[in-house]
Image (tube, rainbow, N blue to C red):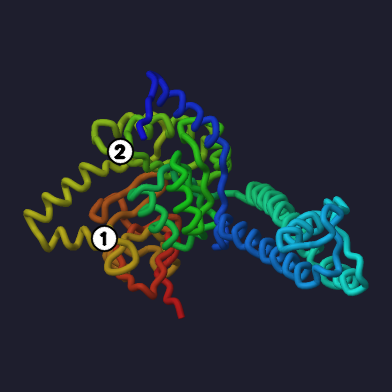
């Protein structure tokens, strides 16, 4: 077959799709049987009931009377079963013997009820499922507070979510926004709530409850999209922490001016890691180990404990990289650090294993 596309047809289709998907919210759900398979199973059961009824009538065809010719053959039996189970009842074929009437009372009538339950039950289940889904959505929106919104569920977005969730964040507190239906289906399959739509539109971000989010991760494929999303998100939420990723380093200042608290340049970071691996493979391995989450070395930010107050950076048990004091980030060798204070936060390098959970506000905790 050949498909003819008129000029502008693609643009019209895209706009139509946008109108459809911009208000779609999908919550994670249990794995259930495919809807088509459920319908096929019910139709099969209904057909079996119909065939069974027709065979019962045909087996006792002498007890039935056909107004047209007086006899009931196999076709008449199927016809009678069809109009009887559907409660149509034209009356052209009727049971005349006591045995046939007894069979209609105790056999065919229960089959008729079963047939109607199968057909009507499918419609009721669809309506019930829609009501249940709407109730879940309202409850989710009411309870959602201080959550994390991730714009883009590609490689960067997935890695960011895995890193954040490894610190103890529950999947119920993560909302993914992406314009692709299949991507959102993958996100909900992993246990995250998803919103289908263009994140540059404020109504889509409102659906993701960005105005009540604690932190926003922007991992779009294009830098210009990241800028627009950052502007829109910052307008809706002045207090959220926004972290964005860009491909080109020259676009990083524009993201910060748009409202991003931190900007990660993915292309430059990968290039520097490649160059470092060429100059020193061992140093490259260490950096890669720090980037990977869940084992080996990890960078953790934690508060200063009481036992460390008044000590120097070198006197702590952990390997301190920087000290966060107020809004300043001081290097480990900065003389301005002096002695550690209770309000300071330490950025340290720790070793973790698959059995260790690293939380951002505490030391690694061993899981039993």
Choose the circle earlier in sequence order: 2 or 1: 2
Question: Is residue 142 visible in the rendered structure shown here?
Answer: no
> Which residue is at a point 75% across and 58% down the rendered structure image?
76
In the picture, measured across the screen, residue 284 lies left or right of residue 60, that is: left
Disc 2 target residue: 246
Total marks in image = 2
Residue 145, image x and y in percent?
60, 49
Residue 113, image x and y in percent?
81, 63
What's the distance in space between the residues labelled 2 and 1, CA to CA?
A: 21 Å
Q: Quadrant of residue 347?
A: bottom left
Question: Is residue 70 visible in the rendered structure shown here?
Answer: yes
**The one of 150 and 186 positioned closer to us in this rendering:** 186
The crowd level at tag 1 (other Cα within 10 Å; few <14, some 14-19, many 20+) is some
> Which residue sits furthest top?
7
For label 1, the SS is helix
Residue 346, image x and y in percent?
36, 58
> Which residue is at a point 82% across and 67% down the rendered structure image?
108
> Which residue sits furthest front?
69
The crowd level at tag 2 (other Cα within 10 Å; few <14, some 14-19, many 20+) is many
Q: Which mark is residue 330?
A: none
> Which residue is at a point 83% across and 52% down the rendered structure image?
68
Residue 141, image x and y in percent?
64, 47
Which numbered mark, 2 or 1, is in the foreground of this view?
2
> Which residue is at a point 33% across and 62% down the rendered structure image?
293
**The one of 46 and 180 positioned closer to us in this rendering:** 46
In the picture, measured across the screen, residue 251 lies left or right of residue 61, that is: left
Q: Is residue 341 above or below residue 249?
A: below
> Which residue sits furthest left?
279
Q: Is residue 348 above or below residue 331?
A: below
Disc 1 target residue: 290
């Amino acid at each position: 077959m050949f498909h003819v596309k008129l000029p502008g047809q693609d643009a019209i289709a895209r706009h139509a799709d946008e109108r459809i998907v911009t208000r779609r919210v999908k919550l994670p759900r249990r794995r259930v049987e495919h809807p088509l398979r459920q319908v096929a199973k019910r139709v099969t059961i209904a057909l079996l009931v119909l065939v069974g009824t027709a065979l019962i009538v045909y087996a006792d065809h002498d007890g039935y009377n056909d107004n047209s010719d007086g006899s009931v053959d196999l076709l008449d039996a199927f016809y009678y079963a069809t109009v009887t189970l559907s409660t149509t009842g034209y009356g052209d074929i009727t049971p005349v013997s006591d045995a046939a009437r007894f069979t209609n009372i105790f056999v065919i009538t229960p089959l008729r009820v079963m047939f109607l339950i199968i057909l009507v039950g499918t419609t009721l289940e669809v309506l019930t499922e829609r009501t249940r889904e709407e109730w879940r959505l309202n409850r989710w929106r009411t309870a959602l507070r201080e959550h994390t919104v991730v714009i883009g569920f590609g490689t960067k977005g997935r890695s960011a979510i895995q890193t954040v969730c490894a610190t103890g964040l529950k999947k119920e507190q993560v909302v993914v926004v992406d314009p692709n239906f299949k991507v959102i289906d993958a996100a909900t399959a992993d246990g995250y709530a998803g919103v289908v739509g263009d994140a540059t539109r404020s109504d889509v971000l409102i659906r993701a409850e960005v105005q009540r989010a604690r932190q926003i991760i922007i991992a779009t494929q294009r830098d210009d999209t990241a800028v627009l999303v950052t502007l829109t998100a910052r307008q809706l939420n002045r207090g959220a922490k926004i972290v964005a990723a860009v491909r080109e380093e020259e676009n990083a200042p524009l993201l910060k001016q748009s409202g991003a608290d931190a900007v990660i340049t993915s292309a430059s970071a990968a290039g520097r890691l490649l160059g470092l691996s060429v100059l020193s493979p061992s140093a490259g391995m260490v950096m890669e180990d720090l980037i990977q989450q869940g084992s080996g070395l990890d960078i953790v930010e934690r508060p200063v404990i009481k036992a460390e107050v008044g000590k120097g950076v070198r006197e702590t048990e952990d390997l301190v990289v920087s000290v966060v004091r107020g809004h300043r980030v001081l290097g480990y060798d900065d003389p301005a650090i002096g002695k550690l204070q209770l309000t300071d936060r330490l950025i340290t390098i720790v070793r973790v294993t698959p059995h260790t959970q690293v939380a951002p506000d505490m030391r690694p905790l061993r899981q039993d």
